[in-house]
Amino acid sequence: MRGRDVLRRVITGQWRLAAGGAVLAAGHQAGEVLVPVVIGVVIDKAILPGDAGALVRWLAVLGAVFAGLSYSYRFGFRLAERAAERAAHELRLEMTRRTLDPRGGAETGRLPGELVNIATGDTKRAGAVHAALAAGAAALAGLVAGGVALLWMSVPLGLLVLLGIPPLLGLAHLAGKPLERRSGAEQERAAHASGVAADLLTGLRVLKGIGAERAAEARYRRTSRDSLAATVRAARAQAWHDGGMLIVTGVFIAIVALVGGRLAVSGDITVGQLVTAVGLAQFLLGPLSILAWANGEFAQGRASAARVASVLGAPPAVAEGDGEPARPVRGALRLRGVRDGDALRGLDLDARPGELLGIATASHATATALLRLLGRSADPEAGTIELDGTPLRDLDPAAVREAIVVAEHDADLFEGTLLENVAAAAPGGPDGAAAVLGAAAADEVAANLPHGTGTLLTERGRSLSGGQRQRVALARALATAAPVLVLHDPTTAVDTFTEARIAAGVREARSGRTTIVVATSPALLAAADRVVFLDGGTAAAEGTHGELVHEHPAYRATVL
């Protein structure tokens, strides 16, 4: 329910502004009603009698009405549009907060591109209900004012309009239901297509490397066609909705004009009143069209609001602890009976304070599950993980990630200079970051760039080679000076000589701090104080790299 509560708070938070816009817009519609009324009076009071003075007075009144129309329209819809933009902006902020929430969960089952689509397109549609609200309220006010004016001239005409409005509104609501359903499906497929496109672009180099461009192209073509089909269905529903409402409103206005004409022929209304009736009949087309448009906006807004609420209300991936690690953080990690699907099956593991611990496993699933649990992207299905004797479940996820930094194998770089990337989380800023460049062999990367550490990198660091990106990402992880640092395969794209240099650099840079290296690199494991070999989701062997190579065939096969 939290997602709907947040959505309701944001939307209702702008209602006062939207209501102000609705009042002014309603004034505009009332002024529109006055125009044919005043023209009819001019005909009856000034033109037919030939009274020049009365003509001037009533023309002045007509000019004042137009001045009021201009003011109310301009400022009324300005307020409504401001409310819509503010609501959309606040929804985008809420989406960002939820996506960046340390407890996670918003991204579950969604591609990154899909989240971006919801945070842009759907929030805009949801915020637009304020503009639709103001326009719809103004149109309704115009219809009521027009009905009252007709009722003042002729009871049959007035009753025809006032009694005809409710059925029209009900019909518009029913006509909007298919549009709401298909609009939701359209946004869903468009978001999925955006997610697939972003996913393919991210892995474009890998796809080219394995020759899978055609498979990727076919996948995106299918997704794009599904999105196109959903868009066409939504457009067809929009066309039926708008066209149907236009026919209904046109028939309604024709009936009003026909009744007005018969009343004029029978002498029940004057010539001026006939002009007024015809003018009001033509005017009513505007409010009725606006109501049809507003109803369509509401239908699409409701579908988008449901998608936004589903993200805001997504359950957290981890429990919400509120504790803080003991200060200073010693860096002792203790895992007991940790289970996570088939990847970890009752794992017992200890990392001592200040130790460089190597963890080797042939299973990518086991390594990924361990990293996910240590970084509190998820909690174990069973068992406990403790930091300095305190279960991670009892700690604030943000505090855990300050104490335990997990550097993923495929960590992305960002647009900016090389030094800015490394210093992104360095406590000492650029000065502290510069000291770790050598430890990660990233100083060689800087030396080969045109402007050294001041060289601008492109998005995701694509201007660098795979090995260069790895070294810069490792330098960034080392620069955090975290009490516990977990590294996952940080040297898979570098040569053997550079790997040996990095192993020595990591050991020196992390001296006195707990470091866990999850890798199968002999150079990194040889630099570790102790190595634990995981097999079948449990700890199968423990010792130094040299001992395990000589004594454990499965370990030897994994790392050599």
Image: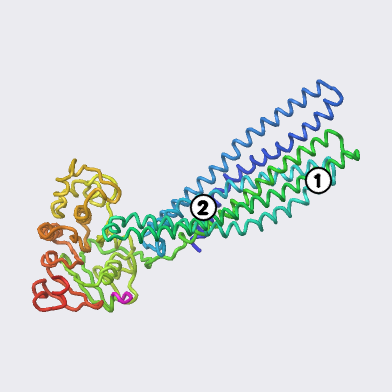
Q: Where residue 560 sits in the image (x, y, percent)?
A: 13, 70
Q: What secondary structure do most residues of the magenta stretch adopt?
A: loop
Is residue 104 toward the left or the right of residue 548 in the image? Answer: right
Q: Which residue is drawn at 77% across and 27% down?
A: 58
Q: Where residue 342 sits in the image (x, y, percent)?
A: 31, 77
Is residue 178 toward the left or the right of residue 210 in the image? Answer: right
Q: Nearer the viewer, residue 47 or 68?
A: 47
- The numbered disc on residue 81 is none
- Magenta stretch: residue 411 in it? no
- The numbered disc on residue 10 is 2
Secondary element at tag 1? helix
Q: Which residue is drawn at 82% across and 29% down?
A: 43
- Magenta stretch: residue 341 in it? yes
Mark 1 touching mark 2, by CB under 8 A? no
* Residue 403 visible in rendering: no
* Residue 162 visible in rendering: yes
Q: Which residue is drawn at 54% across and 55% down?
A: 232
Q: Which-is-in-front pick, marks 1 and 2?
A: 1
466 lies above or below 72: below
Q: In the image, which residues are magenta?
A: 339-343
The kind of residue on which mark 2 rests is Val
The kind of residue on which mark 1 rests is Gly
Q: Which of marks 1 and 2 is nearer the N terminus?
A: 2
Q: Label 1, on which residue?
A: 158
Label 2 crowding class (10 Å Cα cut-off): few <14, some 14-19, many 20+?
some
